[in-house]
Amino acid sequence: ICKNAFFFFFYVAKRFTPPGTLITSLYFENYDRDVYRTGESRLAEDTTIEYPVANVPTEILSFEKLADIWDKISLSDNEQLVIEALKLIEPKVERLNFIKNVHNSQRTAIVKLSGSKDPIPLKNLGEGMLRVLQLILSLLQVTAGGFLLIDEFENGLHYSVQPKVWTLIFQLAQQFQVQVF
């Protein structure tokens, strides 16, 4: 989206829409015509303006997508952050993993609870657990200077847990320098 005619040119506009980036809005209301021309020439160069962004839609992402994100952070320090987030709803969560479903070969999330011998499917613990998993994994996939866009945060979350989840999201956003919308 651009309110300045100088930036509508195809060779300039395409710099703002590479795959996986946030489209920015440029509006230089207080600058004169020469500044626009300078900006236009700089943007016409082979440079890309990128902002890492993750989107949390209203519906739960597929387990395949969640598993792909999990694979990138598992065995890192961030793995424990995900476990701590899940503990906001179910304090007995000890571990998380994604395994292939024997019926359809798709991956599904399982958790190990303290005091339980066998892992159980994460979805058995309710939609709130899936929502927290999605929120935290999405935040952790965005690098410093990026954006996390959350649509209908409250979906699946009981009102009593929402302040705890917000607190964790804001702490992690500050720690990882991510802006949350």
Image (cartoon, rainbow, N blue to C red):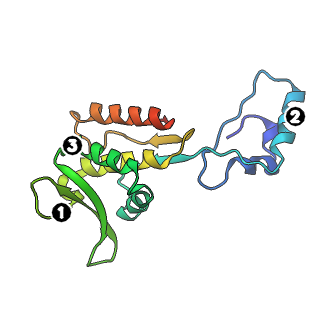
Residue 3 in view here: yes
Q: Secondary structure at mark 1?
A: loop
Total numbered labels: 3
Q: Residue 142's spot in the image, x, y percent?
A: 50, 46
Q: Residues within 10 Å of mark 1 (few under 14, many from 20)?
A: some
Front label number (2 vs 1): 1
Q: Which residue is mark 2?
A: 38
Residue 58 in view here: no
The disc at residue 119 is 1
Question: In percent of the image, x 14 and y 52: which residue is there?
Answer: 114
Front label number (2 vs 3): 3
Q: CA distance from mark 2 to mark 1?
A: 60 Å
Q: Residues within 10 Å of mark 2 (few under 14, many from 20)?
A: few
Q: Is residue 73 left or right of residue 52?
A: left
Question: In percent of the image, x 36 and y 51: which residue is there?
Answer: 79
Amino acid type for the residue under numbered disc 2: Thr
N-term mark: 2 or 1: 2
Q: Is residue 28 left or right of residue 80?
A: right
Amino acid type for the residue under numbered disc 1: Pro
Front label number (1 vs 3): 1
Q: Which residue is mark 3?
A: 89
Foreground residue among 87 and 33: 87
